[in-house]
Amino acid sequence: MPPFVRALAEQAFSRAAGAPLVPGNHVRVLKDATENYPAWLEAIHAAAHKIYFENYIVADDRIGREFVAALASKTRAGVRVRVIYDWLGAVGAASRRLWRPLIDAGGEVRCFNPPRLDNPFGWLARDHRKMIAVDGRVGFVTGLCVSEKWAGGRARTAEPWRDTGVEVRGPAVADIERAFAEAWAVTGSPIPPEELVDPNALAPAGDMMVRVLATVPNIAALYRFDQLIAAIARRTLWLTDAYFVGVAVYVQALRAAARDGVDVRLLVPGASDLPVLSSLSRAGYRPLLEAGIRVFEWNGPMLHAKTAVADGRWARVGSSNLNLSSWLGNYELDIAVEDLRFAAEMESMYEQDLATATEIVLSPRNRVRPTVRRRRRRRGGSTSRAAAGALRLGNTMGAAITNRRVLGPAEANTMMGLGVALLALAAVSVLWPLVVAVPLAMLAVWVAVSSLVRARELRAAGRREADEESRPLRQEGEDARDGKPSGQ
């Protein structure tokens, strides 16, 4: 790539992602729990000063208790331990009781964004990040939660979930720490600035160029970054995603790349822990397949990885899924690496994954079907991505009502289900109006009361601010009446 083109690409990436390119790092790919969990525990056991631990789900099971015990042990040894877990992620997986050993040892544990009466819809913003930072020395950014589901064995499935993470050493660890500090400040008092490592104090650990993509709700930085990668890819763009719900703009970017000769591939779960989402994702296959994008469904246990690799040069690993919930609604954390060797390793891992996947094609009758017959396995588990399924429903219904795009035959079942559901709602509203009216009235009262409380708080804050601003003027007037020189 010519130097001036490289400079333009770097500028575009930095502005789109809101994250600078940090040189001097070493990044190691960690595949599945068999490589991730031992590396995390090794770093925790070696901690001398501080541990920052942030994860969407920490389950109250064998794996979760092992990590809590390790963190509590380091706390008793004098290490500063701070932990963030997500309230919604903990629902059905754990309770505050899980963290009692760590809290009793002196560790700091915060729950991210539990529901509040004064903010009825504030709980929709979630902390979906999964990271660990130890001593400013090493950081881990990953798609794995802490649960037996990822480790296998005595959980609901004997087979572990497929997932990917990375270990980072070098100056980029400072950005990983600051991402944690950002989420910590949302949950309460912030981390003192002097506690965070100075990036200039970290010696280079390698020659890899890294961006730490710490995204927050409503900013869409990673969405812009993913769009840019799709636009700039020239040869290959290989994507793995656990909860793909292709919004029209991003699907169009992938279609344009494929029609321009880019080898675009999408690997998704064959059997999701949220079964309804699998059907909704499949409803979006047709536009991809018609443009020449190759779609594969994983045949093993749940595929939970979120990765991308383009042109054998750029790669991304982290917590973000390709849906609006991740792009706009959550706190997410990903690592983007610009390195030929790292990208080659990611490509090799992708090809290994495709060996355990079934390609989805259009049949001669123009129907979406797998290339081979297989028996699907239903898997239970977390419903943390339910919002993503709702987005797909909304996209389909919106297209039908506004006629913004042509709906394909694959979306017929979705449209039929929506139509039946709306007819059922209409029938219930006519026959039993209180069944609909009472919940709506209760919701309206909740929103109204919370709005009034919030308005009162804001008005009081405004009065306090005005009082602070007018206090020097009042004092000056009093001094003038008493005959004192102004300013004394």
Image (cartoon, grey):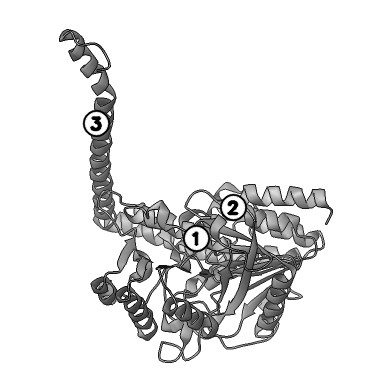
**Mark-to-mark CA distance, 1 and 3:** 35 Å
User: Horizontal and vertical percent for residue 209?
Assistant: 67, 62
Q: Is residue 114 left or right of residue 338?
A: left
Mark 2 or mark 1, which is nearer the start of the sequence?
2
Mark 3 or mark 1, which is nearer the start of the sequence?
1
Residue lying at 29% horizontally and 24% vertically, measured from the top left: 469
The amino acid type found where label 2 is placed reads Ala
Front residue of 281 and 463: 463
Q: Report which residue position mark 2 lands on.
A: 19
Considering only vertical position in the picture, is 184 above or below 53?
above
Label placed on residue 464 = 3
- Quadrant for the N terminus, please: bottom right
Label placed on residue 21 = none
User: Horizontal and vertical percent for residue 433?
Assistant: 27, 54
Query: Callout 1: few (<14), some (14-19), or many (20+) C-alpha neighbours within 10 Å?
Result: many
Query: Callout 2: few (<14), some (14-19), or many (20+) C-alpha neighbours within 10 Å?
Result: some
Residue lying at 76% horizontally and 65% vertically, measured from the top left: 311
